[in-house]
Amino acid sequence: MTSDPAPPSKPAPDMARQIGAAASRKVRAQRRGHKDVWFGLGMMGIIGWSVSVPTLLGAALGHWLDSHYPARFGWTLALLMAGLTVGCLNAWHWVAREDREMHAGENDNDA
């Protein structure tokens, strides 16, 4: 008495969808190409400049205002902090934009 082997079962639809999504992500990654070390260094440079330039401009403008229009408070510190805030928001914008580009369309086929 030999038993017949069980017929091959079909993969679950959910598993097939996950495999399809993974394959499409791989194809999209291959189309985009590989970002190397120079890209990362360039991005760090952009972020660094986007923070440091507004900070230094705020400090310079504050110093100029302090020397020409003295007040009870220091313009230098106030505008330095304002420049730092603007610079951090600017850096956040760059990082968020790059993150959106990296993940664009990633969840299209996952849902």
Image (cartoon, rainbow, N blue to C red):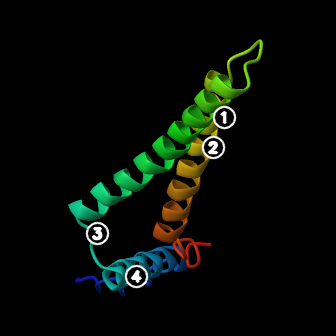
Q: Secondary structure at mark 2?
A: helix
- Closest to the camera, between mark 3 and mark 2, is 2
Say left or right for 31 vs 108: left
Write down the residue under mark 4: 28
Residue kind at label 3, given as amino acid type: Lys
Write down the residue under mark 1: 82
In whole angstroms, how far apart are the C-alphas of marks 3 and 2? 28 Å
Write down the residue under mark 2: 86
Whether tag 3 and tag 1 are in contact, CB under 8 A, the answer is no
Q: Secondary structure at mark 1?
A: helix
The image shows residue 77, relative to residue 46, as above or below, that is above
The image shows residue 19, relative to residue 76, as above or below, that is below
- Closest to the camera, between mark 3 and mark 1, is 1
Residue visible at 40% across and 82% down in the picture: 28
In whole angstroms, how far apart are the C-alphas of marks 4 and 3? 14 Å
Is residue 99 at all visible to an observer of this figure? yes
Write down the residue under mark 3: 35
